[in-house]
Image (cartoon, coloured by chain):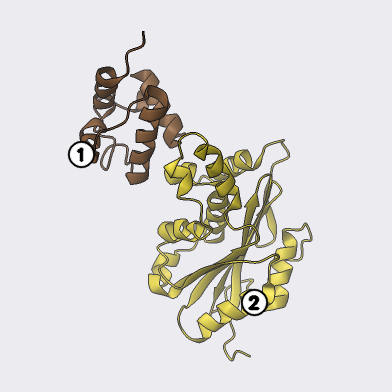
Chain colours: A brown, B yellow
Amino acid sequence: MADLKQQIIAQLNLKDLKPEDIGDDQPLFVEGLGLDSIDALELIVLLQQEYKIKLASAEEGQHVFRSVRTMAQYITEHQPKTV
Amino acid sequence: MSDTQTYITAHCCITQKKVYKNGILLLSDETGSDTTDFLLSAYKYFNVDYPKFYKMDNLCKLGFLAVELLLKERRIAEEYSPETVGIVLSNANSSLDADLNYFQTVKNIPSPAQFVYTLPNIVIGEISIRHHCKGENAFFVSDRFDTGFMQFYVQDLLDRNRINACISGWVECLGGEYKAVVYLTEKRPAKGSLPFNIDHIHQIYEIANGEING
């Protein structure tokens, strides 16, 4: 999850933060990291670029982007298998 | 010709690794930093605390920082009702700096965060959010800083009582070149203020060219 946190920091330009500043279960939006709707789009881009994963629906995003842990679980479950 | 005497009560210039407030040099960075590095070092040097700064494109960072210093030690949001504070800016290259960066991402997956900065008036939005300004605003694009037009436009807004104070000036950023010259115009004078006219706008602009008259 440390790698994922680093990718989130880089993708969202959160230069004041270190990976250890982001809790595994800390909410990413509103009361947590305070991300906004544009950040949500950037997280979708991150999933596509880094993990070749496309979200199926906006509703799915609400669950996936709840925390770093939920993102990591989704990536683990949906990352294309390499042969 | 206006009947109302108005005043430039503060001005700020940022260009070529130098920052001036009311003609006084506040920061000079002689290191080989590029535009992004310099704006970040200035942000830290002046102890600005606004995390969204990191997400902005360079044009917004430049305008935001210049206005941040312009309004330092002022409580503009408390002194004026939000609807009476205007922002009128101009530059020569619009948001071309952000446009080019965004274009690079289009080759792969377009970046939403870069796309939102592909309009010059976004810098006005960032300043408005920070300082709670809700008055008249406009961003003009012209080859050079048209002091005559800028003076006329702002004076007219003040004369018609559409606004009581205005943040205006030139905010230009493209590649390695950047220049912000912003000034606050009000109806009441303050210590060291200048009558709001074309000559004084020109004089302030010359500070950014290294000619210190302010």
Q: Is residue A2 above or below residue B47?
A: above
Residue pictured at 57% horizontal, 88% vertical:
B4
Residue pictured at 40% horizontal, 68% vertical:
B134
Residue pictured at 79% horizontal, 61% vertical:
B211
> Three-letter amino acid code at disc 2?
Phe
Q: Residue B16: x, y in percent?
A: 71, 48
| Left or right of B112 on screen, residue B4 | right
**Which residue was labeled with disc 2?**
B149
Q: Residue B129: x, y in percent?
A: 41, 58
Q: Is residue A20 above or below residue B12?
A: above
Residue pictured at 42% horizontal, 43% vertical:
B112
To the question of a shared chain for discs 2 and 1, the answer is no
Q: Residue B121: x, y in percent?
A: 50, 61
Residue B117 circle label: none
Based on the displayed image, in which of its 4 quarters is residue A49 positioned? top left
Q: Residue B11: x, y in percent?
A: 62, 64
| Left or right of A74 on screen, residue A45 | right
